[in-house]
Image (cartoon, helix red, strand yellow):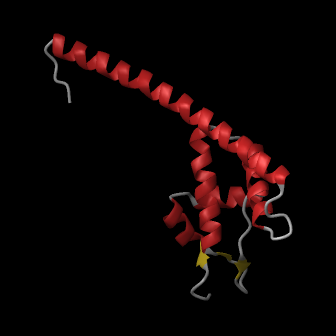
Amino acid sequence: MDSQHMQIGEVADRTGLSLRTIRYYEEVGLLAPTARTTGGFRLYADADVTRLELIKRMKPLDFSLEETRALLEVLDGLEDPTSAGDPALLARLEEFHDAALGRVAAVRERLAIADGFAAHLAEQLTRHGGTSR
């Protein structure tokens, strides 16, 4: 193994994802190891770690596997010199950006509701002689 490649355990450590999750993403076509050892062990590059980090950031926003795959295809297309700057790809990327912004706003709204609920409980604890952290 050369210094440019990592085995799956190191990738799991760097991303905080389980080995099972990384293998699953490979199984469903979101990620492919950059190389394999002569013994068949998966080898990954920094670009694979970056890809996994992107997938990981999409999860809390409830992007489906299909949406994740579609976004990865758009990003891969934009990296391809033959289609870089393609207006259709850029339009799709803008759609994903808009969707992400909308989902972030929804998460913020839910967080505000949760904060209000926690504050209400803290008030109840104080009112009834409990301890609030």
In the image, what residue occupies the spot 60% across and 66% down?
49
In the image, what residue occupies the spot 62% across and 46% down?
58
Q: Is residue 44 above or below residue 26?
A: below
Q: Is residue 17 left or right of residue 98?
A: left
* Quarter that holds the N terminus: bottom right
Q: As rendered, which of 81 and 105 lies closer to the eye?
A: 81
Q: Residue furthest left?
A: 129
In the image, what residue occupies the spot 63% across and 40% down?
100
**Percent of width and height locating residue 7:** 60, 75
Q: Is residue 28 visible?
A: no
**Percent of width and height locating residue 16:** 50, 58
Q: As rendered, which of 58 and 104 lies closer to the eye?
A: 104
In the image, what residue occupies the spot 60% across and 64% down?
50
Q: Is residue 60 above or below residue 36?
A: above
Q: Is residue 24 left or right of residue 126?
A: right
Q: Is residue 115 above or below residue 35?
A: above
Choose top left, top right, bottom left or bottom right for residue 113: top left
Q: Is residue 107 left or right of residue 69?
A: left
**Percent of width and height locating residue 118:** 33, 22
**Percent of width and height locating residue 65:** 73, 45
